[in-house]
Amino acid sequence: MDSPGHLSPTNRIVPQGPNKFDQIKVRPFAPKMGEVNFMQEDDVRLETTRARFSNVLKRHGELTERLSRDSDKMIFERLQKEFEAARASQTQEICLDGEQWNDGLLATIRERVHMEAERKLMQSPNETSNNNLPILPFQEKITYKVGTKVICCLDGARIGIQYETSFAGEPCELYHCVLESKSFLEKMIVLEHTVPFFLPIREAENDLLSSNAMKFIDHIGDLLQAYVDRREQVRLIKELYGNQIGELYHSLPYHMIEFVLDDSDCKVTVSLRYADLLSILPTRVSVLAWPAHQLKKSLTGRKGNGALGSRPIPARLSYAEDALRSMSLPEAYAEIVLNLPHALENIES
């Protein structure tokens, strides 16, 4: 006979309704279920928001590319043909270096374009009233090469600047800017250009063109080259290390960049901010690492007691931040990955 305190299979008490012990097996965190549900719902909302944000960024990028392709392409093709025609008809190309590129030369170029426009106007067959006027001497068609800039005298009293950009010694896009003034004494304006819309050419026009046209021309070239350099650095790390990068976001001028490095031993987040649009190296850098064992420990703690548990504390990777401040992005990325195992050992020890 079984003892009073023992329940045999034949005399086990069957509780009414759902089995209490089965409930504990299936839902071991019942006392804290509200907190667990809250955490799960919060995670779902976060992932949903992230997915929507990624989709918005993707659509924004596609729209920007389409708008730029459709509108700027026609302007680019027309200006490119005009520049090619100007260079084909040139009588001389002068390469300038250092102090040879100055305000006096720019004034000479302005004078040339106005004299050429006046000569064509006076010698036009339709200008019968000018038959008694002397024929102006033919002006040489000179193209000036200043570093990566080509400056041409265009028809209609216009000065054209063609900007050549490059990355790692390889040529990239060409950009154009056409300046015009109604007379030699009037200030110049930007008539048209193929500079990307998110670079502040109009601000530079207002601040510099009327007071220092040479500085304006140089400034636009520096803006374009810095933009191409930042953009190509991001393109290169995506091309070389795309399988290691989980997420990557950037602003249109690439002066704000963020990405996540997914490593088996940790998760690394990188945030870069550039001082201005002329910078090719970031000035504000943040690199944080979450070792995998901390993430697992935090997750285990949540499962074990149902509470929020201690949140993982990221470790700052100073060596990575120093590399990003002093090297190009692809070089710094390789440095980060190479030294990451050693850095994680120091964190865990």
Image (tube, grey):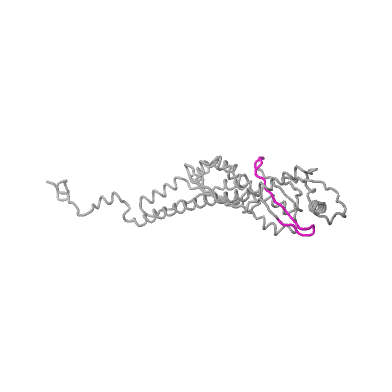
x and y percentages locating residue 42 in the rendered image: 41, 55
Q: Is residue 181 magenta?
A: yes
Indicate left or right for 41 with 92 as reference: left
Q: Nearer the viewer, residue 279 or 69?
A: 69
Q: Nearer the viewer, residue 279 or 325?
A: 279
Q: How many marks?
A: 0
x and y percentages locating residue 104 in the rendered image: 81, 53
- Name the residue rendered at 82%, 53% in the picture: 122
Q: Residue furthest left?
A: 1
x and y percentages locating residue 143 in the rendered image: 77, 45
Q: Is residue 75 magenta?
A: no
Residue 104 in sight: no
Q: Which residues are magenta?
A: 167-190
Q: Nearer the viewer, residue 237 or 324?
A: 237
Q: Nearer the viewer, residue 97 or 156?
A: 156
Residue 131 in sight: yes
x and y percentages locating residue 136 in the rendered image: 85, 51
